[in-house]
Image (tube, grey):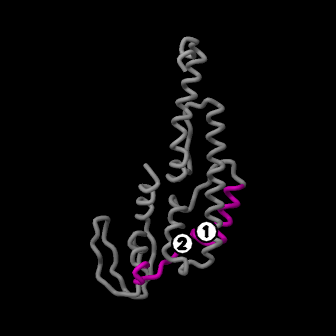
Amino acid sequence: MNAIEIEFLAEKSPITIVPNFSHDKLYLISGDVGPFVAGLPVEVPMWLGINLRERGKCRLVIPDWMDVEKLAEKKEEEKQSKTFTEMPCEHYLIVTQLLLSAAPEDIPNSQQIKTLVKDIWDLRLSKLRSSVAEFIDSEGTHATLDRLTLLEINSVRPFLPHALDQLHRLSKAAHNPALSQTL
């Protein structure tokens, strides 16, 4: 799975909008949405909410977890924990980027939110890199990926199988001197 596919999955996440129009229920392949009543919040897939927002048809309501105080607490929790903490949204980075690019004026403290989410991402990636290094150093055969998001797993996926394959070859060569001459 690549980053574009992960973004596609993130765009299916529900988001609340406040439409400025009225319309009957929409019957979509992914499920029914609406009815839309001007001024009343309604939950829609993120891709639809962003599309309506870009056309000036609604206002986005940011998710509860995208609050500066909650993100600051999550950042501190991540910093203090040796393991990965549970994230409030599986696609927190992508959702934040999509919402901030579509409607920064709908999001209070958007710059602080952007910075906090980036800090959390950096903390988690640093922790992931050190975990991978420890795993490789210990010559592990399996690992648990609890509480990692798809995008985080995808960030180490390109190099990890290759590194493990090289370690396996070196280990095999150390046990069989005839192989070491072919490497």
Q: Residue at x 57, y 18 (%)?
A: 173
Mark 1 closeness class: few <14, some 14–19, many ≥20 residues within 10 Å: some
Mark 2 closeness class: few <14, some 14–19, many ≥20 residues within 10 Å: some
Q: In the shown orientation, is residue 159 left or right of residue 35?
A: right
x and y, in percent, of residue 50 in the image: 43, 73
Check whether the beta carbons of the residues at disc 2 and disc 1 lie within 8 A of each other: yes
**Amino acid at the residue labelled 2:** Leu
Q: Residue at x 64, y 42 (%)?
A: 131
Tell me the element at label 2: helix
- Pick whichever of labels 2 and 1 is earlier in the sequence: 2
> How far apart are labels 2 and 1 at the CA level?
8 Å
x and y, in percent, of residue 90 in the image: 51, 58
Q: Which residues are magenta?
A: 53-79
**Amino acid at the residue labelled 1:** Lys
Residue at the disc numbered 2:
100
For the residue pair 3 and 48, the one nearer the viewer reads as: 3
Tell me the element at label 1: helix
Residue 31, above or below 166: below
- Say which quarter of the image contains residue 96: bottom right
**Does the magenta segment cover residue 69?**
yes
Q: Residue at x 70, y 60 (%)?
A: 76
- Say which quarter of the image contains residue 130: top right
Which label belongs to residue 124? none
For the residue pair 79 and 181, the one nearer the viewer reads as: 181
**Does the magenta segment cover residue 7?**
no
Residue at the disc numbered 1:
114
